[in-house]
Image (cartoon, rainbow, N blue to C red):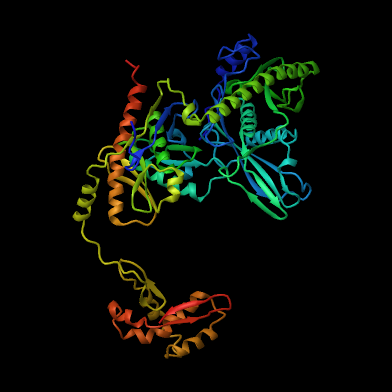
Amino acid sequence: MRDTPLSNCEKHFLLKAIQEKKRLDGRQTYDYRNIKITFGTDYGCCIVELGKTRVLSQVSCELVSPKDSRPTEGIMFFNVELSPMASPAFEPNRQSELLVTLNRQLERCLRNSKCIDTESLCVISGEKVWQIRVDVHVLNHDGNLLDAASIAAISALSHFRRPDVSAQGQDVTVYSPEERDPIPLSIYHMPICVGFAFFLQGSYLLVDPCEREERVMDGLLVIAMNKHREICSIQSSGGIMLLKDQVLRCSKIASVKVSEITELINKALGNDKKVRKEGGKFGFAESMPKVRITTLKRDEAPVEMTDVDETADDILNGTETATEPVSSPVLCATGTAQVGEGLLNSWGLEEEEEDEPPMTEDRKTGSTFCGFLQIYKGYSVGAFWLCVIVAFSVEIFVINIYDLKCVCTLADDVTVISDSEEEEVVILN
Amino acid sequence: MELDKSCPFLREYGNEQSLLSRPDGSSTFVQGDTSILAGVYGPAEVKVSKEIYDRATVEVLIQPKVGLPSVRERAREQCVRETCEAALLLTLHPRSSLTLILQVIHDDGSLLSCCLNAACMALIDAGLPMSYLFCGVTCAIGKEGQIITDPTTRQEKESRALLTFAIDSVEHNVLMSTTTGSFSIKELQQCIAISQKASEQIFQFYRDSVKRRYSKIK
């Protein structure tokens, strides 16, 4: 699927509006859209809505061997996925430039800033460490994906609890959540990316661009910062040339925004913690807005079971009785067995007629069969089965193949033969 | 009112439609704690390699929360796709594609039936023509032979068989069935009968949901 291309009149309209300091949704130049953060039932799951952009992130952990270069540190793994749901332009399993940019930016923002204490993730130095995996799924693309992804990732990391472990020498015991309370990750600071879009060769700037604005922008400046006014990463893309005071101004705006967003995240985390402690209901089911016209909820209800048994019995009595299922494998021709119902397989019959002329040496069965195998040891399995069929062809040929009972009585004893050193082949005689 | 937990019951249901702005239709379906988000795009352009000359091509994608999609998701995708192809009027949109994307938000049992329900509501939201609606019901047969509908993950683990049926809304026929575990023929028919009874409640929920949604339109 392809995205609808941006028309020229739309582009001119947007640029003209920006020149007049107007935005499509009525925001001011430095305004962020509404941010909504909700947490799920299990720890480490979080959905962030930045206006209409929606992002889901999940944190999970696993015990693995550490990297050789850093034997005492845990591993952080980030994976951003652009779900095809987010935009018609996103196709599954396609490495687009946007995806690579998002992944790299998020990694730089969270891993290189050392916001998580990876030393505390070590269980046994050089052997077992925790690998923390953060999966971010973009569910709806309405601009500024990186901001939303970074807020979702850091909220999920702050919400996550890993299982408690104890190490005695080389043995590691991982306790389940019921045995011991899980432990939160130790987070030093919360870096959050703020995106600035530049238009018309850097003369106009907008914070938190929506999707339409992103399409007409010239370049994007992303500043990752924490609330202590420390810049964690800066990236400028799009080839725009920015002046020094522009960058400084952006960093000041970013620090204001980041402190607001950090406060919002902490409030959301606090609310979730309170609800969990009080034993109330939490999770996405609860956070679904109830008062909207597009939502509906229904309580638990029993299923009527009144005439279930009668209906079931009626159906069973009404159907024809099935034929007796043959439970054990039936040998219809050598080399081919049949299990269950259905037409009788006549595969074995045709093959022996074709191949009878070339191999007619040994017509004896049983004990000489092993001799056959030694001779044909080097051949492929297909050839092996042909030999088997031919070896027994004379024996069964005279019996009416379609008389199952006769064939069944042949299955007296089982010969175990080895084709090669590794395999064991069982033939029903 | 105390619910009699010995007889089968359906968990709390919740549904929200049109929550995403980009897809043509979207919905989220919540069954207890299991939550699925579905998005539909269509009818849209289809790749020449995938186009069918007289019908629309239905593509279903199920994305798990952690990790990449595996064979398990492919199996579920096939179940959902077969059901959608039976219900949708595909011949109205030849050489087009209908893409249905399902994202697992939380899995607490009955995942496939929640996917089917979310898919149906998303198709309704997108306005795609269908000959009937469909819903999914999961039954679990416990060790003593008791039948539980809409099981949680814990109940699924303790059961000896798990059956999921897709039921249609007009004649309550079984559109799709997928089962794991061992069970007798009588138990199968009982589960089908129970699923048909449970599907009536789900279809009533669909009707209420759509009625509420369009209640303000004169």
Seen at 75% across and 35% down, the residue is A112
| Front in this rendered view, residue B127 or B38 | B38
Foreground of the two, A35 or A100: A35
Name which quarter of the figure residue B91 lies in: top left
Whether residue B54 is visible, yes or no, is: no
Report whether B191 appears left or right of B26.
left
User: Residue B34, how many percent across, how many down?
Assistant: 46, 37
Total number of numbered discs in the rendering: 0
Give the image quarter of residue A180: top right
Residue A391 place in picture, x, y as percent? 43, 85
Residue at the top extreme of this rendering: A20
Which quadrant holds residue A201?
top right
Instruction: Judge by depth and name the residue closer to the eye, A150 or A378.
Output: A150
Q: Is residue A202 left or right of residue A379?
A: right
Q: Position of residue A89 (x, y in %)?
A: 54, 33
Q: From the image, which quarter does the N terminus of chain B lie in?
A: top left
Q: Residue at x 39, y 80 (%)?
A: A352
Q: Is residue B36 visible?
A: yes
Quadrant location of the C terminus of chain B in the rendered image = top left
- For residue B218, above or below residue A144: above
As displayed, is residue A190 above or below residue A247?
below
Q: Residue furthest right?
A: A244
The one nearer the camera, B75 or B114, is B114
Please state the horizontal and vertical placement of residue A420, each as a whole percent of the image: 56, 78
Q: Is residue A289 left or right of residue A169?
A: left
Q: Is residue A101 left or right of residue B81?
A: right
